[in-house]
Image (tube, grey):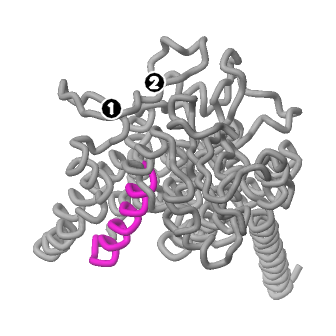
């Protein structure tokens, strides 16, 4: 073969590979957009029916938006304490969407929006193609099950993941910690800490890690940025500061002890685990959960749900939700990159992820993974970044390869759950109300009456604003002693 012919063959081969790569890129993008579109359609059509949705997320959102005022629907004692103490940024956004649209399922959009927003962050901050970010996130079962719900675990953890990734990236690279980085970290931390109480300690640690990096590398300018950050810290931790001022406990309404100091509250700390792990240390429970030991088989469409519920005597009670195979694949990939790049960003990023793992594994209820979605979001985000960064060493798992792996894992999760979480598959608010409310009993309630309702988690469906033009007051109860003499409905 002549030299010129050989060059033409090589050029043709490269052109063919580029063309195939472009086709694959378009295919991944179309798949990502299709999944986002289908999930958004389901989110806007169906009201979330997981327990906490009706129990307090929707009632709190409706109260904050003026849809369900206190003189029409009286919370029971436990829910009133939660309303007084829980971070409510998520419900505030949900209520605003409900009020503006007049459509209860619009509350689901807070959780849904966190997926494309986190993928956009990965694109703008870390150079990860948008499609790959979306597919990698949707390959996590708990992302799929939460993306069309009113639960705030996903948006809170997505914001926390953005903060942690900013800190990891700052330590793993020589990038300066500028004002925009500090502002992004504060905004993400504020969203997380004011949506989910459990996020607060992790927000504080991530901000501290970023502050140390800025102090060490930024000189006088970095110190000015830190001074700027201190001014805004009260906004980041607004909810715990408010609870400390009003109730003497940043974690109110949960009563607890910190370093021997009793912090008052009206609710005992939540503690639950599978019986076989009752005496196991938290890190052991965490490892068993991320590996999904004891959960339902892949043939069961209930393997992955919003709260990973199983009977309390089941081995997989509240366990799993990250897809064990996807977890192992990502851990192996991160470990392989770290071992290969001994002095590069991959090694330092792996150390940062190891620090996150050490902290998360000892947190309360660390085996209930929906509380700590940040761990898996940071793991896939780190791998997507390391695969996509410019100048990275040649790897059999580049950005396209990682995208294909993510797409395959995502489709497995969707197949197991029968695509129920990425399409309209439930009930509208009106259908749910018709099914859950005793219309005959309600028809006998005279205007101006006070009635007691104990039909958790759907007490709010009995409220007068949803049965106009009737006017009466619902007293929510968890027992007869909370009815205040009002007749039970």
Regarding mark 2 in the picture, which secondary structure is present there? helix
According to the picture, the residue beneath numbered tag 2 turns out to be 282
Residue 412 visible to an observer of this rendering: no
Q: Is residue 76 magenta?
A: no
According to the picture, the residue beneath numbered tag 1 turns out to be 255
Tell me where residue 63 appears, x and y as whole percent.
52, 61
The residue lying toward the viewer, choosing from 132 and 483, is 483
Quarter-of-image position of residue 58: bottom right
Regarding mark 1 in the picture, which secondary structure is present there? loop
Quarter-of-image position of residue 219: bottom left
Tell me where residue 152 appears, x and y as whole percent.
55, 54
Alpha carbon distance from label 2 to label 1: 21 Å
- Mark 2: give few (<14), some (14-19) or many (20+) Cα within 10 Å: some
* Residue at x-position 83% and y-position 44%: 417
Q: Is residue 324 left or right of residue 81?
A: right
In the displayed structure, would residue 282 be above or below residue 330? above
Part of the protein shown in magenta: 177-196
Q: Is residue 397 left or right of residue 265?
A: right
Quarter of the image containing the C terminus?
A: top right
Q: Is residue 172 left or right of residue 226?
A: right
């Amino acid at each position: 073969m002549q030299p010129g012919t050989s060059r033409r063959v090589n050029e043709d081969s490269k052109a063919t590979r580029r063309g195939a790569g472009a086709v694959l890129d378009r295919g991944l993008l179309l798949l990502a957009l299709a999944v986002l579109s289908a999930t958004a359609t389901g989110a806007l059509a169906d009201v979330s029916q997981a327990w906490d949705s009706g129990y307090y997320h929707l009632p709190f959102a409706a109260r904050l938006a003026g849809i369900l005022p206190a003189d029409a629907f009286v919370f029971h004692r436990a829910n009133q304490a939660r309303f007084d103490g829980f971070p409510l940024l998520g419900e505030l956004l949900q209520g605003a969407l409900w009020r503006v649209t007049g459509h209860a399922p619009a509350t689901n959009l807070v959780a849904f929006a966190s997926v494309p927003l986190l993928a956009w962050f990965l694109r703008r901050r870390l150079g990860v193609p948008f499609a790959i970010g979306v597919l990698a996130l949707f390959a996590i079962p708990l992302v799929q099950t939460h993306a069309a719900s009113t639960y705030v675990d996903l948006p809170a953890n997505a914001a926390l993941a953005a903060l942690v990734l900013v800190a990891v990236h700052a330590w793993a690279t020589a990038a300066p910690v500028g004002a925009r980085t500090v502002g992004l970290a504060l905004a993400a931390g504020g969203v997380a800490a004011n949506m989910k109480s459990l996020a607060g300690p992790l927000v504080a640690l991530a901000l501290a890690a970023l502050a140390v990096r800025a102090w060490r590398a930024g000189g006088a300018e970095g110190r000015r940025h830190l001074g700027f950050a201190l001014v805004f810290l009260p906004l980041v931790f607004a909810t715990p500061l408010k609870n400390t001022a009003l109730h003497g406990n940043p974690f109110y309404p949960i009563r607890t002890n910190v370093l021997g100091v009793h912090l008052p509250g009206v609710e005992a700390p939540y503690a639950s685990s599978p019986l076989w792990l009752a005496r196991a240390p938290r890190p052991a429970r965490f490892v068993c959960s991320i590996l999904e030991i004891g959960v339902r088989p892949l043939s069961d469409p209930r393997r992955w749900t919003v709260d990973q519920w199983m009977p309390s005597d089941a081995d997989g009670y509240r366990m799993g939700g990250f897809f064990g195979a996807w977890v192992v694949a990502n851990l192996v990939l991160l470990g392989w990159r770290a071992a290969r790049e001994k002095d590069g960003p991959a090694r330092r990023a792996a150390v940062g992820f190891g620090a996150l793992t050490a902290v998360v594994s000892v947190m309360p209820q660390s085996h209930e993974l929906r509380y700590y979605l940040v761990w898996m979001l940071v793991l896939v985000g780190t791998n997507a970044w390391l695969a996509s960064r410019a100048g990275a060493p040649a790897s059999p798992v580049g950005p396209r390869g990682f995208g294909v792996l993510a797409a395959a894992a995502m489709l497995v999760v969707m197949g197991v759950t029968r695509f129920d979480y990425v399409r309209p598959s439930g009930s509208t608010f009106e259908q749910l109300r018709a099914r859950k409310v005793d219309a005959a009993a309600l028809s006998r309630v005279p205007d101006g009456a006070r009635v007691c309702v104990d039909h958790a988690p759907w007490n709010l469906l009995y409220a007068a604003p949803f049965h106009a033009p009737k006017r009466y007051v619902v007293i929510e109860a968890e027992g007869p002693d909370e009815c205040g003499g009002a007749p039970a409905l």
